[in-house]
Amino acid sequence: MDDNVLEKSNVERIRIFEAISQRDWVIKGWKIHFLLSEKKLHQAKQLSKLNKWYEDPLVIHNCVDRLQTCFKSIHKFYLTFGILPQVGDRLFDEESGLIVQDRAIDGDLMVISFTLSP
C-alpha cells in the first residue's frame, strides 16, 4: 500500500469507533490494531463539518494516515530494540504525538491492540 494514498474503499469500511487495522500492519505474525481514546475521537469530531463526523472520509483518512505513521514508529522501534512500546510511550514526535494509553494482547487471534490518546 502506498503510504500517501488510501483507497476510497478502505476509507468507507473503517469505523473509527472500532479497532482500526490494515492488512500490512503485522510484526512477527502479530496483527497490530489501533483504538482511539475518547479524547482523540473528540478531536477528530472537531475536524468535521458533517453531522455524522465519524463517517466523514476526510476525518477517517486523517486518522488512518496518522495511524500508519504510528505503525511505522512501532515497527522501527521493534526492529531496533526487540520490544514493543509500552503504556505511556509517545509515538510520533514530542509535540504532535499520540501516547499509548493502553495495550491489549490476544494470543488466540494473534492481535496486539494499542489504544492511543493525544
Image (cartoon, rainbow, N blue to C red):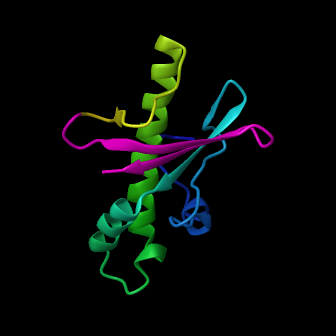
Looking at the image, residue 107 sits to the left or right of residue 19; the answer is: right
Residue 103 colored in magenta in the image: yes
Residue 30 pos. (x, y %): 69, 33
Q: Is residue 38 above or below residue 83?
A: below
Taking the spot 38% from the left edge, 87% from the top edge, the residue there is 51
Residue 5 pos. (x, y %): 47, 49
Looking at the image, residue 48 sits to the left or right of residue 53; the answer is: left
Looking at the image, residue 65 sits to the left or right of residue 110; the answer is: left
Q: Is residue 1 above or below residue 9?
A: above
Please tell me in which quadrant of the rendered image residue 52 appears: bottom left
Residue 50 colored in magenta in the image: no
Looking at the image, residue 79 sits to the left or right of residue 61; the answer is: right
Q: Residue extending furthest left?
A: 95
Residue 71 pos. (x, y %): 49, 36
Give the magenta range.
Answer: 94-118
Q: Is residue 103 above or below residue 47?
A: above
Please tell me in which quadrant of the rendered image residue 100 appears: top left
